Image: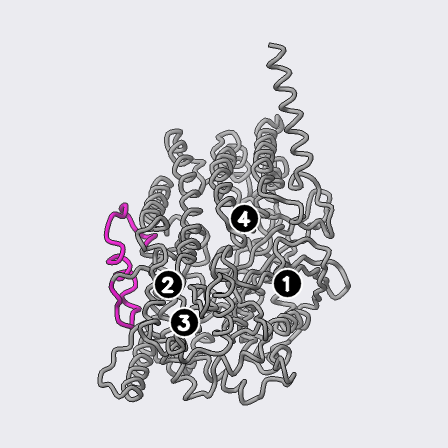
Amino acid sequence: MKKILIIILLSATFMNLMNAANPLLSRFKTPRETIPFNKIKNEHFIPAFDESCKLLNEEINEIINNPDSPTFENTIVAIERSGSLLKRVSGVFYGLLDSENDDELLEIAQIISPQISACHHNTYLNDTLFSRVKEIYQNRIVLNLSTEDSRLLQKTYNSFFDNGANLSPENKERYREISAELNLLELKFNHNVLKDENCFEMLLTDEKDVAGLSESLLEAAAMEAKNRDQNGWLFTLSEPSYLPFMRDAENRELREKMYRARVNVGNNDNEYDNKEIVKRIVNIRLEIARMMGFQNYAEYVLKDRMAKNEENVIDLLQELLNYYKPLAVNEYNTIKGYVSGRENIDNFTVMPWDWSYYSEKLKNLHFKINDEMTRPYFELERVRQGIFDLATKLYGITFKENKKIPVYNSDVKAYEVFDKRGNFVAILYTDFYQRPTKMSGAWMNNFQEQYIDEEEKDHRPHVIIVMNFSAPTETKPALLTYSEVETFLHEFGHALHGMLSKCMYESLSGTNVEPDFAELPSQIMENWLKEKDFLDLLAVHYETKEKIPANMVKNLVDATNFNIGNKCCLQLSFSLLDMAWHTLTAPFDGDFEEFEKAAWESTVVLPDVPNTLMTTSFGHIFTDNEYAAGYYGYKWAEVLEADAFAAFKEAGIFSKAVATSFLDNILSKGDTDDPNRLYIRFRCQQPTITALLQRNGIAYNQIKKR
């Protein structure tokens, strides 16, 4: 018996020593208490999650066992403040999982996911804790709470309801089981997409096969081949490789090969195939929704969104389709006619792998503009400084790189952000370049959210923006396309939303808003790229140092709405596909391709391509619950941001008054009030679709007729 006790004591001592040496479990002794990436190893994560989950359970048990009557402070605020260590560890781990994904991190994610789910369920499925929350909620009218406190109470009550607090004991156990499985499936989906994308490479060695491709793309492709110990030009499915290849490659067969590879990621009947995972995800989500008393998953999640219900979503999508589908059909016929004349072929069928190629040719013919003409003016470091300068002009904040802040990859830079009085505002990390361990696309993430603690200390946010730009080559700096600069602005808008937050509670701060509101701060930033006064801040030729010429800016702006109908219909197709998957009322066991084609049939203009499937790589909705039944939010927010930017256009694009109102009513407020009220306080009117349609070249009299 004594021997066993000694072993237990020695084991406990060993674990204490291990935890003491774990950088995730002690105060970060770094500038601004930033994450000590230089000290964190993969082996630290599981012990850190063990300890942080244990601490969270202790904090929740303390609230449950509190002998005092439930109050807003001892229950609602206490729940809000609980789990701070778990939030910190999770912020580090999941940030790395997206940017430095490897097999070891995935294994760790699969180990810790059930543990985190259990912690989550121990909170929301506890009857005693929910009874305390419910008692406060039922007495909310007499509590005389502030707007932000009322919002926290409402959101807390909703979270308990949405996470099964009202379920029967049997259903609670079932909910625990399937939601834990769901988390693992979403992780696996994401991992499969990355792995399957990386499986494809196309090495070309014949100069005839790379005809039409730009010097910059060929240089990058040659460097990629060299990095993989091959000779020639190597092309991948990463956006900096795929998009310009599809736009410029003269070889139609190779364009088709690239297209089919890209559209079938996760649909190759290999170890990374996602079809069965998709089926299980949508069926679990449906089961959860039905368990909670809703007909389908969309009904379950939309009740708390700006859109409120499926009908409002479909109404918006249909209204947009009514405007943009005729444009898209006309655009297709125009391209078809152009190709028939150019290729001297009657009734040439423009396929999806032809669209970018011939669209670019026609755009260049009409507007005398293309990416290779503008790329020398968008040198990444100059663009970064220009975007930072825009934030200074609008919101008075400045950025100072701090090389003493540890980073997780040599590509990453860290900046301290200050307000106009010199007060510290935030940490901003930038991670710009594509690499095999990074998920495709672009995103903003939080390593640390903003909140004010019980001692009234304002914990400022640490945020990161991640891109997949082409790295500098041996002869050129990193040069961006116009659309890549637009992407930079988009993610920087999310970063501003996070950095400029001034909220009391972490769960309500920054970007913790409904998805159909979250895209307003990001999408509005894209508007400045069409303005000459802003372009002069960042568009400077990397060799001659000359500002971008006025005629080039005019051509860029004039070309903005080129093929806008097809662009809109493509986005609408994704939104309708998302809604189709999440308005199922019976478990799915059908044909994936038939389902997908039927879901977006009304938006399609280009010919159908059999044996293709986009669903299996649709990470927005199958790896992120926030965007499941929420992809429409991009179009919903586009209506908002077009209307919002109209206020800047009326007063001047650098108007301090409008920017201050946007900061005070949108960027700083997080989710502390109903987003509709926040928007109206800024704009002093309800948003309308008019500004969006006018921006896209649909005249006001056309709008009135409809």
Q: State yes or no: discs 1 and 3 in contact (Cβ < 8 Å).
A: no
Q: Which residue is mark 2?
A: 262
Q: Which mark is residue 94?
A: 4
Asked which secondary structure carries label 4, the reply is helix
* Residue 362 point in image, percent of width and height: 38, 85
Look at the picture and state if 685 lies above or below 455.
below
Q: Is residue 488 above or below residue 132?
A: below
Q: Earlier in the sequence, mark 4 or mark 1?
A: 4
Mark positioned earlier in the residue sequence (3 or 2): 3
Mark 4–mark 2 distance (CA, rounded to whole Å)? 25 Å
Q: Residue at x 44, y 43 (%)?
A: 183
The first of marks 4 and 3 along the sequence is: 4
Of residue 340 and residue 421, the one placed in the foreground of this image is: 340
Q: Earlier in the sequence, mark 2 or mark 1?
A: 2
Q: Nearer the viewer, residue 323 or 216?
A: 216
The quarter of the picture where the C terminus appears is bottom left
Do callouts 4 and 3 mark residues in contact (Cβ within 8 Å)? no
Q: Residue at x 30, y 78 (%)?
A: 329
Q: Is disc 4 surrounded by few (<14), some (14 to 19) or many (20+) residues within 10 Å?
A: some
Whether 597 is drawn above or below 626: the answer is below
What's drawn in magenta, residue-wise? 581-610
Answer yes or no: do the residues labelled 4 and 1 have beta carbons within 8 Å?
Answer: no
Query: Residue 33, image x and y in percent?
Result: 71, 49
Residue 696 shows up from this direction: yes
Q: Is residue 340 left or right of residue 72?
A: left
* Position above or below: 552 against 263: below
**Residue under label 3:** 205
Name the residue type under label 4. Tyr
Residue 387 or residue 67, whichever sits in front: 387
Q: Secondary structure at mark 1?
A: helix
